[in-house]
Every structure is written in structure tokens, then in C-alpha cells.
Amino acid sequence: MTKTQLLLISRKYGTFIALLLIIAIFASTTDGIFLSARNLSNLSRQTVVIGNIAIGMTMVILMGGIDLSVGSLVGLGGIMVAVFTTRLHWHPAVAIAATLLLAGVLPGFINGYISEKYRFHPFVTTLGVMTIARGATLLISPVSMSVGETIKFIGQYNIPKPVTLIILSISFFLYAAITIYAAVHRSRYEKTTVQLSKLIIPVAAAAVFFSLLGWVFLSYRGMPFMVLIFALIVTASHFLLTQTRTGRYMYAIGGNNQAARLSGINVMSTWTFAFILTGVLAAFSGIMLAGRLGGATPTAGNAYELSVIAAVVIGGTSLMGGVGNIMGTLIGIFILGVLTNGMSLWGLSSYVQMCVQGIVIVLAVILDSVTKNIRV
Amino acid sequence: MNSPVLEMRHITKKFPGVRALDDVTLEVQKGEILGLVGENGAGKSTLMKVLSGVYPHGTYDGEIFHKGETVRFHHINEAKQSGIGIIHQELNLIPELNIAENIFLNEEPTVWGSVINYSEMYLETHKILDNMGIDMNPRRKIAHLTMGKQQLVEIAKAIKDNIEILILDEPTSSLTEVEVDLLYELLRALKHKGVSCIFISHKFKEIFHICDRVSILKDGKYVGTYPIPDLNHDKMVSLMVGRNIKELFVKETADPGECVLEVNDLCVKNPTRPGSFLVDHVSFKARKGEILAFAGLMGSGRTETMMAIFGAYSKKSVSGDIRIHNNSTNIRNPADALKNGIALVTEDRKQLGLHLLMSIKENITLASLEKISFANVINKPKESQIVGEYIDSLKIKTPSDQIAVNTLSGGNQQKVVLGKSLATEPLVLILDEPTRGIDVGAKVEIFKIMNELVKNGVVVIMISSEMLEVLGMADRILVMHEGKITGELNRKEATEEKIMTYATGGTR
Ligand SMILES: Nc1ncnc2c1ncn2[C@@H]1O[C@H](COP(=O)(O)OP(=O)(O)OP(=O)(O)O)[C@@H](O)[C@H]1O
Ligand SMILES: [Mg+2]
């Protein structure tokens, strides 16, 4: 293998290999605690809250934007759903819908619409919304509040093991079927031959991945409901970015805004949509977090925006816009999640953890830029 | 013959999936102007990037000799120090900086080591521009200059140092005739000073006019080098393309039918000078079955007229009435224009026409995704099929439709922009300098496509600074000068002189 080939591989799978390495390190230094089903199950639950938001943020950053308000929206979402369910005793469905609307759609709309309409960088708009949202949260309730039973259910319920098994099996077979169908179909319209490696590798990887999930969730309490929701969000977003016009437009807007406009793309609506989606996902994360912890804190989600942006950037999405994808972000989320979890198991203080996280972010970006500029 | 000032031997350069250069040899004599020609994607730009250190030593095979000694450039700065300067096919200026700042970028005169000495910088810039015979204020922002002027700034930047070999990659593609003459003078002056030039162009007239010898590339291979007196147009074409091209303009006349596009009193305000207009009460009609050409000098308001029709400017700065099939339209943005069946191929493909990081496929379908999607979901097989058809019909040279367009040669990028507009299946197709940077063979293809479109009832509006193209292809010619339409000529009466008279503001 030549040097360029190595570099090419590290460009494609660099972050993934890094993830595996980190996992291996923790697995071998924590007396098996890290790899225990219980720990991994908890890890999955912790990751979902940040992960959800990172999915929306991927689209925003992909379009050349940024959203600093997400952390505050997590706090606002939690407090709102607490007020609606425990103080006002609204029906949980209504409470959730109202929360998503007020703590998600509305601020997201402001973030997107205003920055596009008046043409200034969303850094400013979302900084403003971030401050407003945190202030509003503390105004509504300066102290922690408990949330309704249904909300707790969302955050804490575990899907029974048999159902987990069924869900995982169906997902795997669906994935395999779609992969094979897509490859065959594609080779037909692109008039190329099907490369077996392109079939076997993803399906095998999926088999390993799903078995791992199965082992974790079946040996410890079943699949958390939150994780299922997250999986659905990831799938839908991946579909949005790869198969729909909206997704294509996002890449186009991030790649060359002016040319996108001249191609007849409605920049305003696509742009605003991504911010609304991110806002909704942040508010929803707030609801899930409150549910998991059994109550909402007004300071919840503090500084989440930084972890979220870090996950997206580690995942290879370019802050310049135009480049990035959901799978990369997913790996970014895992890297951050695994790091936090593993270092806690090591007993490192959260200060040390912060330093390490910072180093990882910088390393990831260096890796990205080094491998991107290879001239072959 | 004395020994060449520069030799490139056995240069081979590979990209994934393409062998852009295959054992190419090139020799440049001192003080000569060497033409470099070849089809789109033949490897001209790549060869020059190898020479100027853009592709550093080690990323290609072969050797370069400068005055008899082997040189290995690891960076453009090293090439520059050896006196090799390049002006790239795509302009590389920073729009938000002014002329002087661009010319002296990274080489600013300083005092105390790091404080920029602005007065000296402006003074020097004045001198450089004066020497070149150009009258421009060094403090003007690049963004406010026409493409032609920007090109001149690039040249000023390249020749301000002691230069021995100047590479010009399609320098004239956005220059007016006057500016081209200016360039010729510049090159001749350089030649007298003993500077050698490598001059890439698809315009044979220029090659025959200015060059001493011509080197020809074909499909990444070296064909040969010929003194100009030994060549003629047909011979050069057949060496380049590998076959004969009989006639360049294959004009087929169709009967003009009903009026499709009607523009009344279109005005565009000048954003930098309130009270004046970029487009000044322009009115015209375009009929089915005709090719309507807009002639004029660079900066005469042709591009702005078309951009305004296409809804590219904010509604506040535009006034006037645009009718399609006698129905008035309300075009507020390019999306509206496309819905009304108006498509535009812009002259500035890098900034306005292309998504450089996206694939050929994604670029071609970007403006017409609605046609190939169900609800919001893109029908990918159909997308591939349509893109395949355009790649074939436009003869885009590429190993696959998944390739990012920034790796395509300039001419092939132009074809992608054209494909994008064609894919919207427009009623009115506006082409702003459609053949810029396109080789002879492809030009003929594009003219054929224009004929085909016209025959199918599409209105084709063409802006071109190529006099021969306008005379060869247009049914009717409107000439603009300083934002106004100053004359109209039909195919029979049009001559180069008449167009020039109108274009410079004269009347008959
Ligand atoms: N960075 C790159 N990556 C991959 N392929 C490339 C890259 N740069 C150039 N190529 C390929 O190399 C070939 C030669 O390109 P080059 O730009 O040198 O052509 P050219 O002769 O300058 O054409 P034109 O007249 O259209 O400007 C083309 O097939 C092009 O697609
Ligand atoms: Mg070129």
C-alpha cells in the first residue's frame, strides 16, 4: 500500500478508526466495565440528547450557518414541558406539541428568517436567541421542576426485550435489503457491474453493529425508547440529505450561495427550515433530558451548543459549508460520548475531561484538513 | 538555434481515473511567444500548473530545465523566484480588496518591517498601470471592476516583478477587442525585453496574430511544435482535433414566429453611483425561431440587462415590464424567472454558475430538480439518465458523472453550466458568452444545439463579444452602449463596422 492510498483511507475512515481506537483503549483499561452492557446502555442514553441536536446542526453548518441557541433551547424545552404538565396539567401530547412549537419552531424561525432576511451571520441572531431563551427559562422558573409521568416515560422507558429483538432484526433486514436493492438498481441505471465488496462490507458492518446493539440491550433492560426515537431521526435526516431536493439544496446553498440563488433555489425557505428543524430537535432533547432525569432544571443544556458543534465538526462537516453528512456526525457524537463516559470511568475530573475534549476537536480538524488536501 | 530558456521533458501527470498528461515535452525559446493549443481537457492548464509549481515536484513524473539546469519547484513561490509567473484560467483576485492591495498581495511594501506603506504601494501601482497603458484608479475595489479590467489587474500583478516566462491561460476569454489589443502591445513589449510567453487560447485568430510558434496537445499527449508560418487554420484544427472541421458556423435559418419575450423600459440603477443607470430604458422583443444577439463592448450593460430579466437583482433597483407570450410577469427572483421559462447561462461560471465541490450530476440537475422528483424525493435513476444524455450531447469529457466539477477543465465546466440551463427546458434561453473557453469542436456543437433549440421553438438570446460569432449565428443583432440600445441590425445588413459604430456610441 502506498502512502497516498493510506491517506485516502484515513480521509474516508479516519474518524471511524479513531473511534474504534478510543473504544479499544477504554475497553482494555477499565476492567471490562466500559464494555459492560449496563455501561453501554447508559452511554447510549446520554449520547442521544446531544446527538439529536447534532443532527439538526449538521444541516445548519452544512449550509454555512451556525446555531448557538440550541443549549438554551434544551433548557427552555425542559422547563416548558414541566410547566405544561405539572403546573397546568395539560394533556401530555398537547404539552409536548406546545413545547416544540414555543421552544423549537418559534426560536428556530427567528434564527433562520431574520438572519437571511437582513443578511447577517446567524452567529449573531442565534447568540441573541440563546440569551433570550436562557433568560426566559429562568423567568419562567428559577428552580428545578418535576415533569409529568408521560414525559418521564419518554425519557426512561425501556422497550421490552422481545420487542427490542424484533425491532433490531427488522431494522437489520430492512437495511440489508435496501442496500442490496439500491446497489443492484444503481448498477443497472449507471450501467456498471455490482461490486460485491460494496455489498458485503456494509451489510457485514451492519450485522456486527446490530448484533452489538442486540447484545447490549438484550442483556440490560431492553432498548431505551429514546434511542429508538433517535434512530428514527437519524434515518429520516440521512434520507432528507441524500434523497430529497431539500437536502440537495442545503449542499448547494452551503457550497455557493449566489449560484444557488441563480439556480432558482428558494434559499430563504430551505435555510429557515434547517434552523426550525434544529430548534425543534433541541427542544425535543430538552424534553427527553427532563424526562430521563425526572425533572427540568433551568440551567439544563448549558454549553451544549459547543459539544454539538464539536460533534458535527469532528464528523467532517465543514464550517465553510457545502461538505458533510449525517454518518460523519454520528461518529462524531459517538467519539465525544465514549470519551466522556470512559474518562469518567477512569475517574478523571471533569476539568481534565474538558481539556481532552478540546484536544480531540483540534486533532479531528487537523486530520480532516491534512487528508483533504492530498494531491494525488 | 540557441538553447531554450525552458524545457519540460517527459512530463506525466495522473489524477484518479485520468492521465491528464502523458509524456509531454515542451520547449520555450528566449523572447518568443509560444502558443499552446488543444481541445478542452487536453491538459494545457495542467501542464502549466506543473510548470508553475501549483503541482509541486513529486506529484508528477518528468523533468523541467530552466536555462539548462534542472529545477524542482515545491511551491509557486519558488517558481516565481525563478521568474516564472502564471495567470490562471480562472481569475484569482480578492474581490473585497482594491487594485493595489491585490497587485501587492503578500508583497506589500512596508516600513519598520511590517507596517504597510500605502502611499508607496499606490504610487507603485500607478506606475505599473501607467507602464501598461491602463487608466485605472488603484483604490478601486476589484468587485467593482468588469471581468476585463480584473484580467488586466491579474496581468499587472504577474509582470510587476522581474519575470522571464509569463504563462497566460486563456487570458483573452473575457477581454474586449480594445483590451485584447492592449494585451498584444503588452506582450510585444515584454518580448522585446526578452521575456518569453506561453499563451493558451482557443481563439485561432489570436494565436496566428501574436505567436511565433505553436505547441499542440491532444488527449494529454504531445503532438508537436510548429512555427506559425508552417501552419494554417485547417491544419491546426486537424492536428488538434484529429479530424477536419469544415464550417464553424452552421447557421440554419428558421422563420421567426410570434413574439415570446417582450421587455419594456427596463432600467437597473447603478448601486455605486446613485442617479445613473447600468441599464437605461431598454426595450426589445424576442421572437420564436430566432437567435437574438446582444453585441457591444464589455461593460455596456448587456450582462446587467440579462441578469435583471432573470430576476437576479433586488426588485428595488430594477424597473420595467417583462412579458412572456404577452402576459405580464412578476419576476422577483431567479426562481420566478425559471418558472416563467427563462433560463440564463452566466458569464461568470465560477462565482455564479457552478457548485465547484458538487458533482457534474448534481450541478446539471440543480435548477430542474422539480422535474425529476416525486414530492420532495429525487428520482435518482431518472437523474442519472438525464445527466447521461447531457454528458453525451454536450460531449463533456469526464470519467463519470460523480466527479466534482472543480476537477474538470475550464471548457468542460462551461458545458456543465450550459447543461444545467438546458435541463430546465426553457422557453427563452439567455446565453452570456456561451463559448468562452470552449474549443473549436465544442463550439460547433454548441452552435448546433442553438440551431436545434431554435428549431424547436426556443428563443435564444446570445451575448457575445466575438464579432464573428455574432455575425455568424444571429438573426438579429441589438447593440448596446452605456446601458442603452444604440442600434438594431438584421442578419443581412450586419457588418463588423456597423456593430462597432453602434457599440462605441456612434450613430449612422
Ligand atoms: N484536480 C484534478 N483532479 C482530477 N482530474 C483533473 C484535475 N485537474 C484536471 N483534471 C483532468 O485533467 C484533464 C486535463 O485538464 P486541463 O484543465 O489541463 O485541460 P485544458 O487543456 O486546460 O482544457 P480547457 O481548454 O478546457 O481549459 C481533464 O480531463 C481534467 O478533467
Ligand atoms: Mg484549461
Image (cartoon, coloured by chain):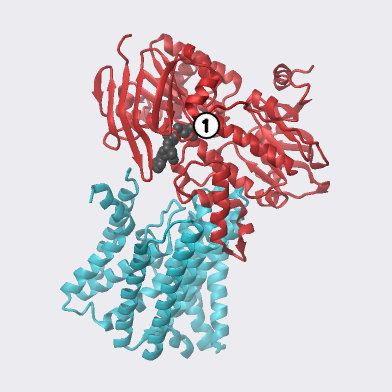
Chain colours: A cyan, B red
Residue name at image x 41 percent, y 25 percent: B223
Which one is nearer the viewer's eye here, B125 or B384? B384
Residue name at image x 57 percent, y 79 percent: A98
**Residue B450 vertical position relative to residue A213 in the rendered view, above or below:** above
Residue B78 in picture, x, y percent from top left: 29, 28
Residue B416 in picture, x, y percent from top left: 55, 43
Which one is nearer the viewer's eye here, B464 or A119? B464
**Residue B68 vertical position relative to residue B454 in the rendered view, above or below:** above
Is B453 displayed left or right of B328 in the figure? left
Q: Would residue B116 be seen by someone viewing this image from the given angle?
A: yes
Residue B426 in picture, x, y percent from top left: 69, 47
Q: Residue at label 1? A: B142
Q: Amino acid at mark 1?
A: Ile
Give the chain letter at badge 1: B
Which one is nearer the viewer's eye here, B73 or B425? B425
Residue B267 in picture, x, y percent from top left: 74, 37
Which residue in the rendered view is the most extreme toward the front?
B243
Q: Would residue A141 be seen by someone viewing this image from the given angle?
A: no
Is B261 displayed left or right of B43 in the figure? right
Which one is nearer the viewer's eye here, B448 or B437? B448
Is B394 displayed left or right of B292 in the figure? left
Rendered-image quadrant of the N terminus of chain B: top left
Q: Label 1 crowding class (10 Å Cα cut-off): few <14, some 14-19, many 20+?
A: many
